[in-house]
Amino acid sequence: MKKSIPIISLVLLTILSLFIGVQSIPIQDIFQLNETQSLVLWTTRVPRTISLVIAGATISVSGLIMQHLTQNKFVSPTTAGTMDSARLGMLVAMLFFPSGTILVKSLVAFIFAFLGTVLFIQLIRVLPGKNQLMVPLVGVMFGNIVGAIVTFFAYQYQLIQNMTSWLQGSFSTISKGNYELIYVTVPVLIICYLYAYQFTIVGMGEEFSISVGMNYKIVHLIGLLLISVASSVVLVTIGGLPFLGVIIPNVVSLMLGDHMKDTLWMTAVAGSIFLVIADILSRVIYPPYELPVSLIVGALGSFIFVILLVKGAKK
């Protein structure tokens, strides 16, 4: 019964998400909607809610995998430079492929996200002692350097406004016809589940992985590829969602432990719940206007992140 509570909560929240917004859609009138209400529901509300559920699960699971690959609880795509590297890829796509499709932009973002993540992994390998708090700080600094490069060239080529509006984490522009790329992350989540046991072993270190007969480098590479695909797709379709990949895996691991086979599904569900709640808040705090959901996620996430950092420093 306890395991069904998160699922039931997510279902109820997704239903609630369908009926909250500037355009009133009374839940009691669901079977007798007028033309405008029906258009809003199927063109924007349903795609938006689906995107919320998938993006929340994807970023949370990506953070969980990255924490196992780096053996650090405070690492995620947003604190390891992955998202910033994907942003650099987006800038390159805008400069060299200005008329390219969203699929082309996603491919370029994926390549840069993967290369940036590999570079971050190499950086932390040379860190002395690999302090739990030092690794995410190095990741944040690395991400800030990449972000500064992106901002500089975006200003130089007058793309800063385009970049900012494109990459700001918001679901207000999600509609039928411009969000379907996010479905690419669904098979990524399935593969993550299939490799959950391997990622758990990899999280115990290279020597242990090799001792039990596992090809550490191959599994590590698969993990990095999955993270890069997921991060780039979410960035291109939704934008940045700070701290989500850090706080959700940590909170879930406090309750269920560190074995990915046991925690991955709950991490995905909890990430979806958190993002749906954040998006609902973004719609009701200052009606009829919407706040960017990244602002809500960042505010709540940074508060929880600081608590997790303090707890980690005490251990």
Image (cartoon, rainbow, N blue to C red):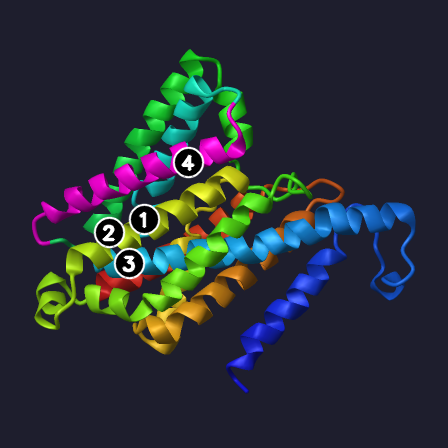
* Residue at 60% from the left image edge and 59% from the top image edge: 277
Whole-percent x and y of residue 33?
89, 55
Is 95 placed above or below 267 here? Answer: above
Pointer 1: residues within 10 angstroms few (<14), some, or many (20+)? Answer: many
Q: Earlier in the sequence, mark 2 or mark 3?
A: 3
Residue type (three-letter) at the residue carrying disc 2: Leu
Q: Left or right: 197 with respect to 251?
A: left
Span highlighted in magenta in the image: 100-129
Looking at the image, which is closer to me, 163 or 206? 206
Q: Is residue 290 magenta?
A: no
Q: Which residue is mark 1?
A: 225
Mark 4: secondary structure:
helix
In the rendered image, residue 241, in percent from the top left (x then y), is placed at 47, 46
Gap in angstroms between the C-alphas marked 2 and 3? 14 Å
Give the residue at mark 4: 107
Q: Which residue does the numbered mark 2 point to in the structure image?
A: 221
Disc 3 to disc 1, C-alpha distance: 15 Å
Which numbered tag is attached to residue 67? 3
Instruction: Kindly check if marks 1 and 2 are in contact, taking CB atoms under 8 A apart as contact.
Output: yes
The quadrant where residue 261 appears: bottom left
- For mark 2, give the secondary structure: helix
What amino acid type is highlighted by mark number 4? Leu
Q: Nearer the viewer, mark 2 or mark 3?
A: 2
